[in-house]
Image (cartoon, rainbow, N blue to C red):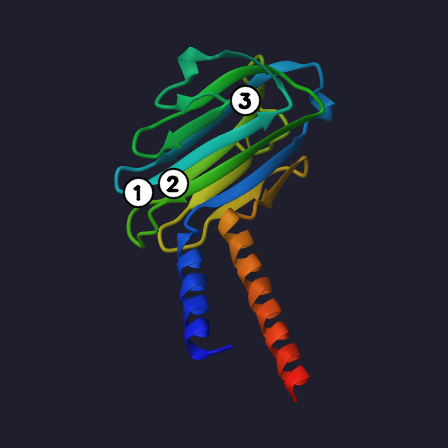
Amino acid sequence: MNHALKLALASLLLACSSMASAAIYHVDIDTTSLEGQGGFVALGLNGLSDSPWVRALVSQYRGASLGAVDAGNTFNAVGQLQTTLKLENTLPNQFTQSVVFGKKLQFNIEFEGNTAPLGSGTSFAFSLFDQSANALLSNDPSGAIVFAEFTPGQALDFKSLNAAATITPVPEPETYALLGLGLLGLGLQHRRRSNLIKMA
Protein backbone atom coordinates (compact mmCIF):
# COMPACT_ATOMS: atom_id res chain seq x y z
CA MET A 1 0.00 0.00 0.00
CA ASN A 2 1.59 3.31 -0.97
CA HIS A 3 2.30 6.05 1.57
CA ALA A 4 -0.47 8.40 0.33
CA LEU A 5 -3.14 5.68 0.64
CA LYS A 6 -1.97 4.81 4.17
CA LEU A 7 -2.11 8.49 5.15
CA ALA A 8 -5.62 8.85 3.66
CA LEU A 9 -6.90 5.77 5.52
CA ALA A 10 -5.35 6.97 8.79
CA SER A 11 -7.01 10.39 8.36
CA LEU A 12 -10.37 8.76 7.62
CA LEU A 13 -10.12 6.52 10.70
CA LEU A 14 -9.23 9.51 12.88
CA ALA A 15 -12.17 11.52 11.50
CA CYS A 16 -14.61 8.65 12.12
CA SER A 17 -13.37 8.06 15.66
CA SER A 18 -13.76 11.75 16.56
CA MET A 19 -17.44 11.64 15.52
CA ALA A 20 -18.26 9.23 18.35
CA SER A 21 -19.29 11.63 21.15
CA ALA A 22 -22.47 9.99 22.42
CA ALA A 23 -22.94 6.86 24.46
CA ILE A 24 -25.92 4.58 23.71
CA TYR A 25 -27.12 1.82 26.03
CA HIS A 26 -29.87 -0.80 25.94
CA VAL A 27 -31.64 -1.32 29.27
CA ASP A 28 -33.58 -4.54 29.90
CA ILE A 29 -35.56 -4.95 33.14
CA ASP A 30 -37.13 -8.31 34.07
CA THR A 31 -40.55 -7.40 35.49
CA THR A 32 -41.97 -10.94 35.52
CA SER A 33 -42.63 -10.66 39.28
CA LEU A 34 -44.75 -7.54 38.59
CA GLU A 35 -46.68 -8.87 35.58
CA GLY A 36 -50.24 -7.52 35.48
CA GLN A 37 -49.60 -5.05 38.31
CA GLY A 38 -50.26 -1.35 37.79
CA GLY A 39 -47.72 1.28 38.75
CA PHE A 40 -45.49 4.01 37.41
CA VAL A 41 -42.18 4.50 35.64
CA ALA A 42 -40.30 7.65 36.60
CA LEU A 43 -37.10 9.07 35.19
CA GLY A 44 -35.10 12.24 35.55
CA LEU A 45 -31.76 13.82 34.61
CA ASN A 46 -30.71 16.47 37.09
CA GLY A 47 -27.62 18.47 37.99
CA LEU A 48 -26.69 21.71 39.72
CA SER A 49 -26.44 25.11 38.03
CA ASP A 50 -22.67 24.71 37.40
CA SER A 51 -22.97 21.18 35.99
CA PRO A 52 -21.68 20.68 32.43
CA TRP A 53 -24.54 20.22 29.93
CA VAL A 54 -25.90 16.66 29.58
CA ARG A 55 -28.83 15.34 27.53
CA ALA A 56 -30.55 11.95 27.68
CA LEU A 57 -32.67 10.61 24.80
CA VAL A 58 -34.88 7.64 25.70
CA SER A 59 -36.18 5.66 22.70
CA GLN A 60 -37.44 2.24 21.58
CA TYR A 61 -39.40 1.81 24.81
CA ARG A 62 -41.37 -1.45 24.98
CA GLY A 63 -42.71 -3.90 27.53
CA ALA A 64 -45.03 -2.37 30.09
CA SER A 65 -48.36 -1.09 28.70
CA LEU A 66 -48.36 2.68 28.96
CA GLY A 67 -51.16 4.61 30.61
CA ALA A 68 -51.53 8.33 31.20
CA VAL A 69 -48.64 10.69 31.84
CA ASP A 70 -48.72 11.85 35.48
CA ALA A 71 -48.91 15.62 34.83
CA GLY A 72 -48.35 16.44 38.52
CA ASN A 73 -44.99 14.65 38.48
CA THR A 74 -43.84 15.48 34.96
CA PHE A 75 -41.99 18.70 34.18
CA ASN A 76 -39.33 20.01 31.78
CA ALA A 77 -39.35 16.81 29.71
CA VAL A 78 -39.89 16.87 25.93
CA GLY A 79 -41.56 14.04 24.01
CA GLN A 80 -43.08 10.71 25.00
CA LEU A 81 -41.88 7.22 25.89
CA GLN A 82 -43.75 5.79 22.86
CA THR A 83 -41.46 7.75 20.53
CA THR A 84 -38.48 9.65 21.96
CA LEU A 85 -38.23 11.37 25.33
CA LYS A 86 -35.63 14.11 25.82
CA LEU A 87 -34.29 15.28 29.18
CA GLU A 88 -31.60 17.93 29.72
CA ASN A 89 -29.91 18.90 32.97
CA THR A 90 -30.27 22.63 32.30
CA LEU A 91 -33.57 22.66 34.27
CA PRO A 92 -34.84 20.35 37.02
CA ASN A 93 -36.89 17.63 35.29
CA GLN A 94 -38.85 14.47 35.77
CA PHE A 95 -41.10 12.28 33.63
CA THR A 96 -43.68 9.96 35.23
CA GLN A 97 -46.17 7.73 33.44
CA SER A 98 -48.59 5.07 34.63
CA VAL A 99 -48.04 1.53 33.36
CA VAL A 100 -49.27 -2.04 33.64
CA PHE A 101 -46.15 -4.19 33.93
CA GLY A 102 -45.50 -7.10 31.59
CA LYS A 103 -42.69 -9.66 31.62
CA LYS A 104 -39.99 -7.22 30.50
CA LEU A 105 -39.45 -3.51 30.17
CA GLN A 106 -36.86 -2.32 27.65
CA PHE A 107 -35.55 0.93 26.24
CA ASN A 108 -32.49 2.51 24.67
CA ILE A 109 -30.89 5.58 26.17
CA GLU A 110 -28.37 7.88 24.53
CA PHE A 111 -26.31 10.25 26.65
CA GLU A 112 -24.67 13.29 25.10
CA GLY A 113 -22.83 16.02 26.89
CA ASN A 114 -20.03 18.39 27.57
CA THR A 115 -16.93 16.65 28.90
CA ALA A 116 -15.67 19.75 30.76
CA PRO A 117 -13.48 18.79 33.73
CA LEU A 118 -15.00 21.42 36.03
CA GLY A 119 -18.39 21.85 37.68
CA SER A 120 -20.83 19.71 39.60
CA GLY A 121 -22.08 16.28 38.62
CA THR A 122 -25.36 15.20 37.03
CA SER A 123 -27.37 12.06 37.70
CA PHE A 124 -29.93 10.06 35.72
CA ALA A 125 -32.34 7.70 37.46
CA PHE A 126 -35.00 5.30 36.13
CA SER A 127 -37.41 4.03 38.80
CA LEU A 128 -40.42 1.74 39.10
CA PHE A 129 -43.19 2.43 41.62
CA ASP A 130 -46.44 0.77 42.62
CA GLN A 131 -49.71 2.72 42.66
CA SER A 132 -48.98 3.92 46.21
CA ALA A 133 -45.59 5.32 45.12
CA ASN A 134 -43.57 2.55 46.84
CA ALA A 135 -40.36 1.60 45.02
CA LEU A 136 -40.40 -1.70 43.11
CA LEU A 137 -37.36 -3.92 42.47
CA SER A 138 -35.07 -1.44 44.24
CA ASN A 139 -33.52 -0.98 47.66
CA ASP A 140 -32.17 2.44 46.68
CA PRO A 141 -33.71 5.30 48.73
CA SER A 142 -34.69 7.10 45.51
CA GLY A 143 -36.32 3.96 44.10
CA ALA A 144 -33.89 3.90 41.16
CA ILE A 145 -33.34 0.56 39.43
CA VAL A 146 -30.76 1.97 36.96
CA PHE A 147 -28.62 4.98 37.75
CA ALA A 148 -26.06 7.03 35.81
CA GLU A 149 -23.60 9.44 37.36
CA PHE A 150 -21.82 12.10 35.32
CA THR A 151 -18.83 13.48 37.22
CA PRO A 152 -16.82 16.17 35.39
CA GLY A 153 -13.49 14.87 34.17
CA GLN A 154 -14.42 11.21 34.72
CA ALA A 155 -15.99 8.44 32.64
CA LEU A 156 -19.76 7.92 32.79
CA ASP A 157 -20.78 5.54 35.59
CA PHE A 158 -24.01 3.81 34.43
CA LYS A 159 -25.07 0.90 36.59
CA SER A 160 -27.89 -1.42 37.51
CA LEU A 161 -29.02 -1.31 41.14
CA ASN A 162 -30.83 -4.65 40.91
CA ALA A 163 -30.06 -8.00 39.26
CA ALA A 164 -33.37 -7.70 37.36
CA ALA A 165 -31.90 -4.87 35.26
CA THR A 166 -29.14 -5.28 32.69
CA ILE A 167 -27.36 -2.52 30.81
CA THR A 168 -25.64 -3.25 27.49
CA PRO A 169 -23.65 -0.74 25.40
CA VAL A 170 -25.00 -0.37 21.84
CA PRO A 171 -22.35 -0.02 19.12
CA GLU A 172 -22.68 3.23 17.22
CA PRO A 173 -22.66 3.42 13.39
CA GLU A 174 -19.16 4.91 13.54
CA THR A 175 -17.96 1.70 15.21
CA TYR A 176 -19.27 -0.35 12.28
CA ALA A 177 -17.69 2.12 9.84
CA LEU A 178 -14.31 1.73 11.53
CA LEU A 179 -14.64 -2.06 11.48
CA GLY A 180 -15.54 -1.94 7.77
CA LEU A 181 -12.58 0.29 6.96
CA GLY A 182 -10.26 -2.05 8.86
CA LEU A 183 -11.54 -5.06 6.94
CA LEU A 184 -11.22 -3.15 3.67
CA GLY A 185 -7.63 -2.27 4.51
CA LEU A 186 -6.83 -5.92 5.31
CA GLY A 187 -8.45 -7.02 2.05
CA LEU A 188 -6.46 -4.50 0.02
CA GLN A 189 -3.25 -5.54 1.73
CA HIS A 190 -3.98 -9.24 1.04
CA ARG A 191 -4.75 -8.47 -2.60
CA ARG A 192 -1.54 -6.50 -3.01
CA ARG A 193 0.53 -9.33 -1.50
CA SER A 194 -1.20 -11.86 -3.78
CA ASN A 195 -0.38 -9.74 -6.83
CA LEU A 196 3.27 -9.38 -5.77
CA ILE A 197 3.57 -13.17 -5.31
CA LYS A 198 2.10 -13.78 -8.80
CA MET A 199 4.59 -11.31 -10.34
CA ALA A 200 7.58 -12.98 -8.70
**Rounded to the nearest whole Å, what is the CA distance between mark 3 and mark 1?**
25 Å
Mark yes or no: residue 143 visible.
no
Identify residue for label 1.
51
Left or right, residue 198 beside residue 67: right
- Residue 41, numbered circle: 3
Q: Earlier in the sequence, mark 2 or mark 3?
A: 3
- Compare residues 2 and 19 and report the one nearer the observer: 2
Q: Residue at x 46, y 73 (%)?
A: 6
Q: Position of residue 135 (x, y in %)?
A: 58, 24
Q: Earlier in the sequence, mark 1 or mark 2?
A: 1
**Rounded to the nearest whole Å, what is the CA distance between mark 1 and mark 2?**
7 Å
In the structure shown, which secondary structural element does the residue marked by tag 1 occupy? loop
Circle 2 packing at 10 Å, graded few (<14), some (14-19), many (20+), is many
In the structure shown, which secondary structural element does the residue marked by tag 3 occupy? strand
Amino acid bearing label 1: Ser
Which of the image's four quarters has the C terminus?
bottom right
Left or right, residue 134 beside residue 37: left
Amino acid bearing label 2: Thr
Identify residue for label 2.
122
Residue 67, compared with residue 51, is above or below; it is: above
Mark yes or no: residue 25 visible.
yes
